[in-house]
Image (tube, rainbow, N blue to C red):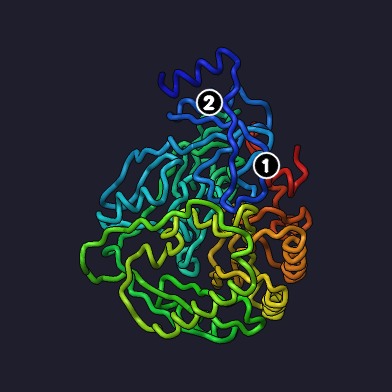
Amino acid sequence: MSGQSAAKLRKQSGVPPPTERILSWGRYPKIAHQRVHKPAWNDQVPEIFNAAAPGALLPYGLGRSYGDSCLNAGRELIDCRRLNRILDFDASTGMIRCESGVSLSDIIDVFLPKGWFLPVTPGTRFVTVGGAIANDVHGKNHHCAGTFGAHVRQIGLHRSNDGLVICSSRENPDMLGATIGGLGLTGVIAWADIQLKRVSGPWIDAESIPFQSLSAFLDLSRESNDRFEYTVAWLDCFAGKNPRGIFFRGNHSPSHGAEFHPKRGPKLPFALPAWMLNRYSVKAFNTVYYKIHAASKGVAVVPYDSFFYPLDSIRQWNLLYGRQGFLQYQCVIPDTNLGAFEELLDRIARSGMGSFLGVLKQFGSAPAAGMLSFPRPGLTIALDFAMRGERTLKLLQSLDEIVQQSGGALYPAKDARMSPALFEASFPHWRSFVPYIDPKMSSSFWRRVTGAQ
């Protein structure tokens, strides 16, 4: 029986969709089973809408959001992964039209051999187009390219009360701005037109430079922004107010080296025991990582996947943090308030819970593509903390105080526990977004931070 026939049969018989245990990438929070719809075709989405109660639904992609923005506890998800067709491509302009379940990995595999690449990419290629739009993801080139949403030219959006709505800069522009960064709450994206960028091949001219203070990082960032499309840094979070780290920068290489084939790395078969990840093992890892990269500093031509997606080489790397999962903390603090950023780093170092995946980036001044877009001028840092109960939560609450007092913000796609007060401070105009929420949509995150029912 086809997926379409099965969906119609369930609707006619009144049988609800099956339940599944769905976890976000951070594996925290752990919630009860959710009912999951799995449409295979876009024309099945209106049927799902019609049968749903108000506030019952949330679209779901590959589950790479770290907290609960991709979860809908006690309600229903629309799994969009089978809506994964590439519908059109203009080889002269690089404009692609694809369904929302197409992954960034799919786009790279098909179009990089033809000389086209993503205009913006996050740190993993295993994200759907719908998820990239809903979270308005950013990457190493924010200072010159802005966010993913800035390169979305048009979308077709399923709405429970309006049918299929076409959104672009000319037609329903406000709905387009609400959907970009809108956390999947405005409807289900049927398809999107995305402008790809022309590149010469799969190689990156990359350079790594060690630094030993926050001011040195800022000097490198300012000096690199005009000459390098991609900049980012790894940070040793045990180093405190004057952290050491490795600054990475690069451009697409004109070099035509050997034929390149991405490699699939090992897969973690199970969650590691919690005792293996402690302050001593993480500190030792940070020391070794810094010394290796400091010793190999300089220029090299590297494949794109190791430059953009180093963690994708370890499948299910989230299991490194054990059965209790982890919390990622990504904030942005205005770079006019470096004292607050130094205090944040100092608290992390003194806590003994430093992350071995500290990523530091200076955002550019590109205008927000969406109403709830996270990136804004300042320094952003992303850190992973193994979940150790109240101790971990208290540390993150203390970091929240610094972020809020400094006029900074937290990233919803990475969050599992920010307070309504901090959400209000991070996105003070969020109430202007509310009228664009589809009446049938909700999420665990949205109910938590706004008190919505």
Does residue 170 appear left or right of residue 196 in this picture?
right
Residue 425 position (above or below residue 132):
below
Does residue 180 appear left or right of residue 228 in this picture?
right
Callout 1 amino acid? Ile
Residue 241 position (above or below residue 38):
below
- The local crowd at label 1, few if under 14, some if 14 to 19, many if 20 or more residues have their Cα within 10 Å, is some
Q: 206 or 267, which lies in front?
A: 267
Callout 2 amino acid? Pro
Q: 176 or 359, which lies in front?
A: 359
Mark 1 and mark 2 residues within 8 Å of each other at the beta carbon: no
User: Is residue 337 visible in this depiction of the protein?
Assistant: no
| Residue 151 falls in image quadrant | bottom left
Q: Residue furthest top?
A: 13
Badge nearest the viewer, 1 or 2: 1
| Quarter the N terminus occupies | top left
The tag on residue 248 is none
Q: 55 or 8, which lies in front?
A: 8
User: Is residue 406 visible in this depiction of the protein?
Assistant: yes
* SS category of the residue bearing label 1: loop
Does residue 108 appear left or right of residue 428 in this picture?
left
Q: Quickly name the residue at label 2.
A: 46
Mark found first going from the N terminus, 1 or 2: 1
Q: Quickly name the residue at label 1.
A: 31
| Quarter the C terminus occupies | top right
Return the x and y of residue 271 as percentages of the image width and height: 56, 53
